[in-house]
Image (spheres, rainbow, N blue to C red):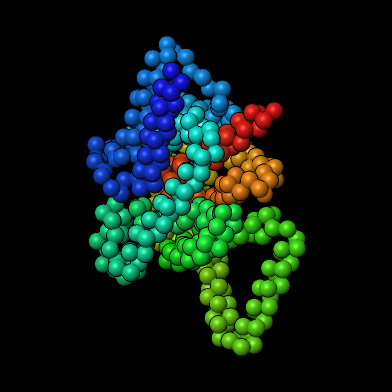
């Protein structure tokens, strides 16, 4: 009987791994359109997971053991969020978009639930971690292929582009460059932590440093300013919160010495870097013409979102309906753009004050708990330290990375990331209770 349960659990874990792997590739491969929705491997595997989960409950006469779930407060919020999304159908002006978003939210919450339910051992999370690393290498490979050939996958917005300023933009398996850039921002901490805590340190550095260099190169090719800020914030957090004072002084001294020697022997290189950095930073403050994609349009999108938030008494316009409202009732010109291009504003406008505040507690609560766990884990537990540090740094970067794509509600990598965070948090709490 015990062997049967182990085999069933292993099979469901295997299905979950397939779901996660296919989720990274989204609709880039094997996509079939079904009217307002499309079906692809990730969604098929998720349906199969639900089928076997419900079947196991029926076979056990309705009994469900959830004693291994120690992140119930976070799952409760996700359940409330999903319930509120369904409830908002009552006042959503465009039910089609509302239903689509409910499906996206349900799939994301389902993935998180299954990972928390099944991944309760360190080896599960270790596999998850290296799946992420391998997928990152694969997606960067596709990005480099786009940069050097000008070709794109059929699901890319740049597929068939002829203009040089679009033709060589990397989007990898995603529809646009901003999603690829956000994925890179979340993935670089995984490479960093692997270099820092991997068993074969020198080999990890030999492999990891080129990977980070390619990631930075790919990010530069996307021209995603929000994700440059995300990476800058991650580096700031590493330097001031994860490094000890002695190491910060040593690194600061080394950087200062390199800069001084560069100015003495190769002055043209630091001057070129300075001018390029100045030009990049100037792009954040220089006023743009009021055209599609400009900074002013983004500001108007946010202003419209706040306007609809207020006119709907802080309850939100209904799940997935902010685009419909901006398209039909906007007070400020957006020149055809309808999505807020800001995940935080989108949650506020779609779901209102209560879900937005709940999401802030959800997000900052995860950061706070991982921060505490990072301090608790001994340096000898290198695998735990590696996973915790990667997730913590990526969570910090998520604050800016999430405002780059038009929307991340339908982005599977976003839900996979939070799946990993909650699975690790649940594992550590379960492990701590077991010790007691």
- Residue at the farthest top position: 61
Percent across and percent down for residue 94 are: 36, 34
Q: Residue at x 46, y 52 (%)?
A: 133
Q: Nearer the viewer, residue 207 or 22?
A: 207
Q: Residue at x 43, y 18 (%)?
A: 1
Percent across and percent down for residue 154 are: 26, 54
- Residue at the farthest right position: 246
User: Which image quarter: residue 368?
Assistant: top right
Percent across and percent down for residue 141 are: 37, 60
User: Which image quarter: residue 354?
Assistant: top right
192 w.r.t. 124: above or below: below
Q: Nearer the viewer, residue 29 or 82?
A: 29
Residue 389 seen in the figure: yes
- Residue at the farthest bottom position: 265
90 w.r.t. 339: above or below: above
Q: Residue at x 41, y 57 (%)?
A: 137
Q: Residue at x 43, y 23 (%)?
A: 3
203 w.r.t. 305: above or below: below
90 w.r.t. 25: above or below: above
- The number of callouts visible is 0
Percent across and percent down for residue 40 are: 29, 40
Quarter of the picture holding the C terminus: top right
Is 52 on the left or on the right of 428, as rendered?
left
Residue 307 seen in the figure: no
């Amino acid at each position: 009987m015990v062997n049967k349960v182990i085999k069933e659990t292993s099979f469901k874990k295997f299905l979950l791994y397939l779901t996660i792997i296919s989720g990274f590739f989204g609709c880039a491969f094997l996509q079939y359109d079904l009217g307002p929705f499309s079906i692809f491997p990730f969604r098929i595997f998720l349906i199969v997971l639900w089928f076997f989960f419900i079947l196991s409950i029926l076979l056990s006469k309705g009994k469900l053991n959830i004693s291994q779930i120690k992140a119930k407060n976070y799952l409760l919020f996700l359940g409330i969020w999903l319930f509120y999304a369904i409830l908002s159908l009552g006042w959503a002006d465009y039910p089609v978009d509302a239903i689509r978003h409910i499906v996206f939210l349900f799939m994301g919450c389902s993935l998180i639930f299954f990972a928390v339910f099944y991944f309760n051992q360190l080896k599960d999370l270790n596999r998850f971690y290296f799946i992420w690393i391998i997928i990152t290498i694969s997606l960067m490979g596709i990005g480099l292929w786009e940069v050097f050939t000008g070709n794109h996958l059929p699901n890319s917005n740049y597929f068939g582009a002829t203009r040089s300023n679009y033709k060589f933009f990397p989007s990898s398996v995603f529809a646009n460059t901003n999603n690829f850039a956000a994925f890179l921002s979340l993935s670089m901490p995984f490479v960093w932590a692997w270099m820092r805590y991997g068993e074969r340190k020198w080999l990890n550095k030999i492999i990891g440093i080129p990977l980070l260099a390619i990631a930075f190169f790919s990010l530069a090719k996307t021209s995603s300013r929000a994700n440059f800020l995300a990476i800058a914030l991650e580096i700031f957090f590493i330097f001031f919160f994860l490094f000890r004072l002695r190491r910060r002084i040593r690194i600061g001294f080394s950087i200062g010495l390199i800069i001084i020697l560069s100015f003495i022997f190769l002055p043209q290189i630091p001057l070129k870097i300075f001018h390029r950095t100045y030009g990049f930073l100037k792009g954040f403050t220089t006023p743009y013409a009021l055209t599609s994609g400009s900074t002013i349009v983004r500001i108007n999108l946010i202003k419209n979102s706040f306007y609809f938030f207020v006119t709907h008494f802080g309850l939100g316009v209904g799940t997935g309906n902010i685009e419909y409202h901006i398209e039909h009732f906007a007070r400020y010109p957006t020149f055809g753009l309808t999505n807020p291009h800001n995940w935080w504003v989108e949650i506020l406008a779609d779901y209102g004050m209560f879900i937005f505040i709940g999401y802030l507690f959800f997000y900052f609560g995860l950061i706070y708990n991982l921060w505490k766990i990072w301090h608790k884990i001994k340096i000898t537990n290198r695998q735990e330290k590696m996973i915790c540090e990667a997730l913590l740094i990526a969570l910090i970067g998520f604050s800016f990375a999430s405002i780059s794509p038009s929307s991340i509600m339908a982005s599977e990598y976003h839900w996979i990331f939070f799946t990993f965070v909650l699975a690790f948090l649940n594992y550590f709490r379960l492990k701590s209770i077991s010790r007691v």
